[in-house]
Image (tube, grey):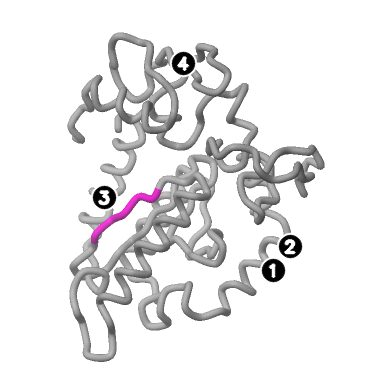
């Protein structure tokens, strides 16, 4: 089971998000904490788990795009393409006002066509040979599908894909095979793969999603996959 986080760690994490922890103790990831918003200076309650998924102060941030980045409003208001409500975007490419609208958008025909278009472009997506799903990855996604609504190998993040995306949790799971860590052949550049991985993680985080990386260095192993899935479930309960 993952090591329980300390109060000091949680306080520093919340501080890095821009707010201040007021509670004097931390119990677990699903216990409510008293937090001070440094935008409106009001107190609010939220769990540590929700904060790691980008859900901060509802009044100031929940309705901001993809979890509420605190970037000052430098852009003009735009209208959300889903709910038609006017909001302040955090970037010039932001078209959706909230997590709820982003999930709705991911189910539209327009989004699916966008995914096909981006998926056909090279460079951003995984290399052709590496994009083949391993048996371990497929089995893991099947386990996830039993508990969540998921998409797989979906270029959701401006053309960058994730092996399993759980939109309701705002988690992007990356099932990384050995080519992400070792030089496999002369035609494959390990440096290029790792550089691409860093860029992908950055884009995923900018969308307000939490990257979750699983390192798979072996062949098909049902027990290994089930163990990784149980670890993932535990991590969702107590980070």
**Mark 2 in CB contact with mark 1 (< 8 angstroms):** yes
Name the magenta segment's main secondary structure.
Answer: strand
Dot 2 alpha-carbon crowd within 10 angstroms: few under 14, some 14 to 19, many 20 or more: few
In magenta segment, residue 213: yes
Q: Nearer the viewer, mark 4 or mark 2?
A: 4
Work out how far the residue at label 3 is from the one at label 1, CA to CA, in angstroms. Answer: 32 Å
**Mark 4 in CB contact with mark 2 (< 8 angstroms):** no
Which quadrant would residue 84 be assigned to in this image?
top right
Q: Nearer the viewer, residue 108 or 61?
A: 61
The residue identified by callout 4 is 36
Image position of 187 with respect to 199: above or below: below
Dot 4 alpha-carbon crowd within 10 angstroms: few under 14, some 14 to 19, many 20 or more: many
Image position of 105 with respect to 13: above or below: below
Q: Residue furthest front?
A: 74
Residue numbers of the magenta segment:
211-215
Q: Secondary structure at mark 4?
A: strand
Q: Nearer the viewer, mark 2 or mark 3?
A: 2
Q: Nearer the viewer, residue 95 or 29?
A: 95
The residue identified by callout 3 is 228
The residue identified by callout 1 is 113
């Amino acid at each position: 089971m993952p090591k329980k986080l300390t109060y000091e760690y949680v306080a520093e994490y919340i501080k890095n998000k821009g707010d201040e922890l007021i509670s004097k103790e931390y119990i677990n990831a699903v216990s409510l904490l008293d937090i001070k918003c440094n935008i409106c200076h009001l107190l609010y309650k939220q769990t540590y788990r929700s904060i790691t998924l980008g859900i901060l102060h509802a009044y100031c941030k929940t309705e901001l795009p993809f979890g509420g980045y605190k970037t000052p409003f430098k852009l003009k208001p735009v209208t959300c393409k889903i709910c038609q409500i006017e909001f302040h975007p955090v970037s010039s490419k932001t078209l959706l006002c909230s997590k709820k609208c982003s999930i709705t958008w991911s189910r539209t025909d327009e989004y699916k066509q966008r995914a096909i278009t981006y998926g056909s472009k090279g460079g951003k997506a995984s290399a052709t040979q590496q994009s083949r799903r391993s048996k371990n990855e497929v089995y893991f996604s099947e386990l996830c599908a039993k508990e969540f609504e998921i998409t797989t190998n979906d270029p959701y993040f401006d053309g960058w894909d994730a092996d399993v995306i759980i939109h309701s949790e705002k988690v992007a799971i990356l099932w990384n095979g050995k080519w992400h860590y070792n030089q496999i052949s002369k035609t494959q550049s390990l440096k290029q793969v790792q550089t691409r991985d860093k860029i992908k993680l950055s884009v995923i985080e900018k969308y307000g999603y939490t990257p979750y990386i699983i390192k798979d260095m072996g062949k098909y192993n049902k027990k290994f996959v089930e163990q990784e899935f149980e670890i993932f479930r535990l991590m969702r309960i107590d980070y």
